[in-house]
Amino acid sequence: MALPPAAEMQELHRLALTGNMRDILQYAEHIAGIDPSYQAFATYLRQLANGYQSKAILAFAEAHLP
């Protein structure tokens, strides 16, 4: 799975800290539109957000911070 640039991962981390799934879903749409190679990342993020998996999103973001 291709990951977005560090700045985008930092934004995901910020959003994950707030726990707002609506914002995270909007972020996933934003990422999907940046580059088609991020589609799998965006899909995974959408699945987590739709399942209200805030801790999993936070852990994922923290694991991929620069």
Image (spheres, rainbow, N blue to C red):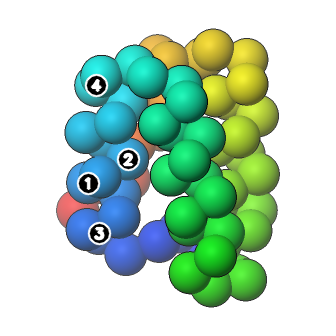
Question: Of circles 3 and 2, which is in front?
Answer: 2
Percent across and percent down for residue 18 are: 30, 22
Foreground residue among 27 and 3: 27
Figure quadrant of residue 44: top right
Using the image, determine if residue 20 lies above or below residue 27: above
Identify residue type, mark 2.
Leu
Q: Which mark is residue 12?
A: 2
3D distance between C-alphas at marks 4 and 1:
11 Å
3D distance between C-alphas at marks 3 and 2:
10 Å
3D distance between C-alphas at marks 1 and 2:
5 Å
3D distance between C-alphas at marks 4 and 3:
17 Å
Percent across and percent down for residue 29 are: 64, 58
Marks 1 and 3 in Cβ contact (< 8 Å): yes
Residue to which mark 3 is pinned = 6
Residue at the image position 62 percent from the left and 85 percent from the top: 35
Residue to which mark 4 is pinned = 17
Residue at the image position 60 percent from the left and 41 percent from the top: 25
Marks 1 and 2 in Cβ contact (< 8 Å): yes
Marks 4 and 3 in Cβ contact (< 8 Å): no
Q: Earlier in the sequence, mark 4 or mark 2?
A: 2
Q: Is residue 19 left or right of residue 17?
A: right
Identify the secondary structure beneath mark 3: helix
Identify residue type, mark 4.
Leu
Identify the secondary structure beneath mark 4: helix
